[in-house]
Structures are given as C-alpha cells and as structure tokens.
Amino acid sequence: MTSNNHTQNREFQQDARAWADFTGTKYTAALRQMTSPLAQGLLGDRVSARRLIAVLTDHKLIGAHGGDPVLGENGFLSEEPWHFNGETDFIELALITDMLRMFTPVSGTSTPEVGSYSLKHTAEWFLSPHCSCVSNGRLIWAAAALGLPIMDPDGEGPNLLIGVSEREHDYVRRMVGTGQTQPQVDHYRPAGYEHLRVALAQAAAGELITEKWVRPEPVIEPAPFHDWLVQQVGRNDVVGDLAGDYSAGVRDSDHRVAHTAGELLAIFHEVSHSPEAYDAVVTSIAEWMRTEPSPAPIRTQRISGDAHDHDGWGAGSGTVERYEFICPCGDGTIVEEHDNTPGFREHDVWIVCDKCRVEWRFAEGRSTRDWALEPVSVSTAA
C-alpha cells in the first residue's frame, strides 16, 4: 500500500467516525458514504465530513459558537432538527457542494444576490436523480463549508443570500428547471457546468473521477460596440429604447453579445423584431460610427455562392463567380460578381433592395471582394 493510499484511507476512516458520531449512524454505513464515487469531489477536493461538522459550530454566521444550533433542516434560525437517513446524507451534501462549486463566486466586496431557497430548488433539479431532496438548511450548510459569501438579508431567516453569480444561476435554473424557458445562448453558462454533468453520470456508474477539474481563467473578449450600447440605456430616444431591449436580451440569455455593430445586425435577423426596431438599429450603428475613431464597417451573412467554368469569348476560358449576401434589412440581397475570363475581367457588387440602397452605402477604399457597408447617415451627418 502506498503512503498516499494509506493517508487517504486514514482520512476516510476519521471522517467516517466523525460522521457516525454526529449523525448517530453505524461506522460501516458512514464509511460507505465517505468512499462513494459520488462523494469524491467532482469539481474540487473531496469534501471533509469533519469540515462540514465544524462549520455548524465555528462559522461566523451559521455557527452555534457553543450555544444552541442556529441552522436547521429548514434553514437559518430554523428549529427543525436535521434528518439523517444514515445512507445518503453525506453523499448528498457532497453533491450539493459540487453543484455550488460550479458557479463563479462573487467578490468579497459584492453583496450576495441569490437566495438559498431558489438555489436549493436548482440543486434538486440539477442533481436529480442522484439527490432526491435538497433542504434549505443543507444548501446553506454546503455554501458555508465552501467559504462562499453568505448574508442574512433581514435577520429573521430562514433564507440567506449566497454569493454565487446571479446570471450563472439563472442560466442553470432555466436549463434544468421544470417549466422554465431555456436560454438561447450560453454566455452565462458556468465554466464547470458540462464537466459536472459528465462527471455525475460517470460517478453514478461507479467510476472514480481521477482527473481534477481546474477552473479556467476568464477570457475577456473586447466588445467595444456592446460597451457603448449598454451605456446608452436610459436615453429618452430610439437609441436608448434599443439599448434597453438589447441589454435585457443579453441579461436574460435571449441572444448573444454584440461585440461589433455587425453582430448587432446579425442578432436582429435571428430574433423577431418590428420595423421600428430595425430602424433604431440603423440609427444606433450610424451614431456609433460617427463617434468611434476607427469603426469597422459591416459585412452581412452570405446566403449562396457559385463559381463555374466559362469557355470565354475567344481569348481563353476562365471562371465566373456569383455570391449573394443578405441585405441589412433582410428583405433583399447584396450580389457580388467576378468575371474571370480573359478580356472580360470584371468585378462588381451591388445592393438588390430598394430600402437598403437608400439607407446604406459601400465603404470607400475597399476592394470588391472586401466590400463592407456603413449607414448613409454616417457620411451625410454634419
């Protein structure tokens, strides 16, 4: 037996004795729980039974500190005693801990916003069928053992606020909750979400998870147009109205983030919108381009393309290319053609939409293959 295995077995045994004494169960039953694949730490180190027990005494908010217990089955300041079945209670606490590890913790200076009662339902849905019931008290207990920020909003209990990302929690709740509208995009999906789902299935099948998950460093993608647009929220004009609707859509995961003005236009082709909303998009993009020092003009999505051989007109064979792109309003097209036959080498691009021909123009100084658009009002504004 290696020293690592000996140390691990000793930790299992010490935890099992502590848990058996605390819950009034048999040592052998407690040891089975300690060694269960589901309790080995799927998103971090194995949770310690001794740590869980100590939290109920020592934690700044939910610890008894030598007095009567302040955390019970129903939550903070609950007089409902803990109900231990002696078979799965430690495993379920370990799973709740892993579920909470999935979320990004809020910073120490931020006020927690996610209620424990809402989180406990999310845990039940996400962990089903491996965890049949998650009580409010056990959710708070696991959060305290993890060291997450916890706050009592009113001093009355039984619900506390837990310091995990509100947007990530909303995403998971909508993904797994009964009767919820699922998110359309994944920008608020917790980093550990997919790993935990896979690891749960593997552990439930009896497989020990040996590869530890490491939380990736957050990648901040530049989003200058998004940053500008959300700053327009609250304006009393069409740009302010659009900014409010756009920000709500990002917040609710109804559509992705528009890093560029072109991405905003693409989003509006993916979601239902009114003609007035489209006009507000054009107005916003025009204002952005007037205020930004070096704004990138817009390319739209290609919808068809074809290149075929041509015998030519006596000077040799060549090819003819024709590509069609959606126009900005979505009702017409932009056509790009290239005649590559000797003696007739022509390249052209034009807008096949009466509305867009009035509102948009091709940006100057770009080749036919590299065409891009900008609102006419950008060049005509004083």
Image (cartoon, rainbow, N blue to C red):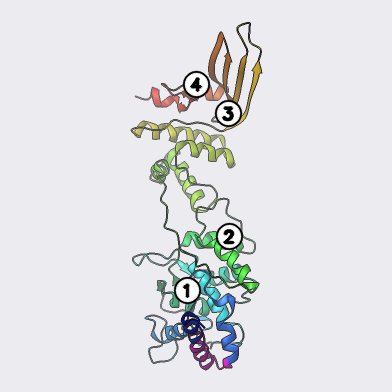
Q: Is residue 285 above or below residue 257?
A: above
The answer to whether residue 38 is left or right of residue 45 is right
Q: Mark 1–mark 2 contact, CB under 8 Å? A: no
Q: Is residue 123 above or below residue 271?
A: below
What residue is shown at x 50% (from left), y 67% (from top)? 212
Q: Which residues are magenta?
A: 11-27
Mark 3, residue position: 325
Of 195 and 95, which appears nearest the observer?
195
Secondary structure at numbered mark 1 = loop
Identify the amino acid type marked 1: Asp
Q: State the separation of the CA atoms marked 2 and 4.
A: 45 Å
Q: Is residue 279 magenta?
A: no
Identify the amino acid type marked 2: Arg
Mark 1, residue position: 45
Mark 2, residue position: 174
Identify the amino acid type marked 3: Phe
